[in-house]
Image (cartoon, grey):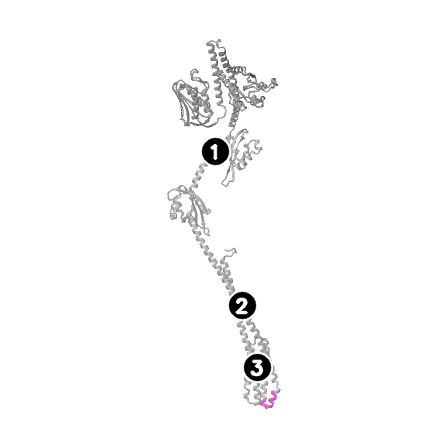
Amino acid sequence: MTGTGLSLERRIQIGFGVAVAIIAGVGAAALRSTQATVDSARWVAHTLQVRAELEGAFADLIEAETGVRGYVITSDTSYLAPYHAARTTLRSGLAGLRALTADNPAQQRRLDSLETLVATRLDRLQRTIDTRRTAGLAAAARAVIGGGGKELTQLAHELFTRMEDDEARLLAERSATLQARARLARLAAWTGVLVASVLAGLAGVLVGREMAARRRAEQALRETQTRFQQMLGSSTAIIYANTVSGTTFSPSWVSENVTRITGYRSDEPLQPSWWLDNLHPDDRARVLAEMPALFADDQLTTEYRFRGKDGAYRWVHDESRLLRDATGRPIEVVGSWVDVTARREAEVSLRAGEERLRLLVGSVRDYAIYMLDPDGHVRSWNAGAQHIKGYTEAEILGQHFSRFYTPEDVAGGRPAAALRATAAGGRFEEENWRVRKDGSRFWADVVMTAVRDDRGALVGFAKVTRDLTERKRAEQALRSYAAQLEVANKELEAFSYSVSHDLRTPLRSLDGFSQALLEDYHDRLDDTGRDFLQRVRAASQRMGTLIDDLLSLSRVTRGDLQVAAVDLSALAAAVATELKKSDPERAITFAIAPDLVARADAGLMRVVLQNLLGNAWKFTGRRPAAHVEVGVMAHDGRRAFFVRDDGAGFDMAYAAKLFGTFQRLHAAAEFPGSGIGLATVQRIIHRHGGQVWAEGAPDRGATFYFTL
Amino acid sequence: MHDRSILLVEDNPDDEALTRRALAKNNIQNEIVVARDGAEALDWLFGTGPHAGRAATPELVLLDLKLPKVDGLEVLRRIRANPSTRLLPVVILTSSREEKDVVTGYGLGANSYIRKPVDFGQFVEAVRQLGLYWLVLNEPPPRPDAA
């Protein structure tokens, strides 16, 4: 179809109408032209007839004169025959001419003159005849010669001639008209043929095109129908139709995918009671109650459970439309059916989830959880928000959230800045002071999240606020303690330095000068005096050791842990080697398990092993052959390293005292020691986050365990 | 003036006496010059203050760290900063075993760091070894003014 506004059919009709009109016009023109030709031909014949009549009449007159002259000369009456004949023929001939030229007034007038002339001439000829008969030849001859007959004939001849000329002129005119009309008729006929041919050809082309277009349209329609069938076959929507009479439906058609979707054969849904029979009993009353709406609104959308062929109920979304005839009477219901079970289940679980979330949020008291609209007005409020900020839900809904900020922050534009930052980044977090309803301030941890809809448009903000005032105070206290501790540590360090330097100095004097006395005044002292000086020296030296051990104990609690993978096996082996070197005479075996690797501070682990192996070495001193074992075992799911000896052991009743500073379970005379070693070990293990403990029995050896 | 003296920088008379005794017991006969604090030691070495014009270069400096006025580490820094004493052997002889003192001492160019043991016997042994090493075995650096 082109855009002319007229349908192809209409244009073809118009084309044909124009062609028929043209052909009719041409026919009429040709007919009229033929009629004119015939008329013209009749006029030509008429003219020729008039001329013939004129010539005939003139000849009759001349013959009558000639006959009369013969009678005059001879007195023979036989010569009068032509004259008598002419009297009759001339009268009828002139009457005929009058009839023939009735349409021509000029010829009629001439005919009037001619009739008078002819009558006069015939009267003269009668008198001549009468004269001959009564007066003889001579009188008659004079009458002929002087009677004026010759002039009358001459006048008649002229009139005849003039009438003939007029007829000749008419003949010429009529012949010309005849030819012109014939030419026009031919032209009209040819033009008509041409126009009709063109129109007929044009109409043929248009009809041909229309036919082709119609074929294509039919092809397209068939393809569309096929596609529609295929689409319906694979669609998840079942299409159906019901005929309506009154308010009752009877199923008339259903798409074939009903079988694939519901399991029913496609003829089963056409059973009148199929739909109602399979509608879930709990939904039946509701759906039937909705039916009048279909007649009121001409459409109905509803959802209900429907039993499939397998007996299981599925949720169905049913959209139907009521079709009416021209008078408004309902005739048919068409609609579609979609299985929405998955969506319904998702909705149910979503609602359940939302309800759970609502309950959860509502019950939270330690967090203020609430929503803001995009402009920052409070839209929801939970118990935690009321608890922390002091406002009830009724008081705060619709209020702007800037009232939670301090006046300084409001003046600084922080509420608006927080909204902007959240909208831009999706999330905003800060710790700052906030204000409660009663005006008191609290230290808040605030997390703000932008909430957007499916299309990404900002619909509001979710805010979670925690009151960290207590924690803030605790942190401040902790920081203050840490600072105090720092100072104390510094003082301790200075103290340790003094101890290491200044406390040892007098000891050196004690020891050194005691020795000088023993050497320089040896002979002036008795054994008791020398023994006393020896005791002074021993005490000085023991105190030196004590000071050193105390310093090393304080040293392990200072400084950072340098944690790395440490090979305890290698470290233990090195310490054992040092011990053996200090007393090669001892019969002692070390059994060290291989590949004891732990993450720890290597320097401190060396101190641990020096102390534990040193103890084992020391407390096996009285065994003729001692055995020391280093290994690992599982303890409460952790690896516990251990050092076991078969030495003096200890009473488990005193196990708790083992790791105390300066605590000793053996007399110094029995086993020397400062009582600081195990305290040092414990501090190092604790700094590693581990535990240390011991098992033992008197004279049955001891085992020291530690975890890291 | 240059001789084979030993400069003992030590504020504690007991320690001075014990050190003298230990040196004597090891038959170290060098003259012992004692400075009671860091300032005195520097005056003696550089010929300033009471020792104006009498700068002396000893064979060896035995330097305590904890000293009145100018402490031992500062004395060491000045010794190393001065061209005339830059190469002088300095042995730190102190009670402290603090790691930071040891590290700082060596960092400032101490030649040895010896901790004075409480046990006098051990101290005598230590002095014997340092005397043997620094006064007998060690080839001293060329003296600036002897070159």
Q: Amino acid at mark 2?
A: Leu
- Image location (x, y in percent) of residue A209: 48, 58
Q: Amino acid at mark 1?
A: Val
- Calculate the distance from the C-alpha at mark 2 to the C-alpha at mark 1: 104 Å
Q: Residues within 10 Å of mark 1 (few under 14, many from 20)?
A: some
Question: Which chain's residue wears label 3?
Answer: A
Q: Is residue B87 highlighted in magenta?
A: no
When asked about the image quadrant of residue B44, the answer is top right
- Image location (x, y in percent) of residue A555: 49, 22
Name the residue nearer the viewer: A448 or A572.
Answer: A572
Mark sitting on residue A20:
none
- Calculate the distance from the C-alpha at mark 2 to the C-alpha at mark 3: 45 Å
Dot 2 or dot 1, earlier in sequence? 2
When asked about the image quadrant of residue A573, the answer is top left
Question: Which chain's residue wears label 2?
Answer: A
Task: Select label 2 or label 3 by which is in front.
Answer: 2
Q: Is residue A685 visible?
A: no
Q: Residues within 10 Å of mark 3 (few under 14, many from 20)?
A: many
Task: Select label 3 or label 1 by which is in front.
Answer: 1
Please tell me whether residue A161 is drawn above or below residue A556 in the rendered image: below
Mark sitting on residue A187:
2
When asked about the image quadrant of residue A649, the answer is top left
**Residue highlighted by disc 3:** A58
**Residue highlighted by disc 1:** A361
- Which contiguous range is marked in magenta? A132-144
- Calculate the distance from the C-alpha at mark 3 to the C-alpha at mark 1: 146 Å
Dot 2 or dot 3, earlier in sequence? 3
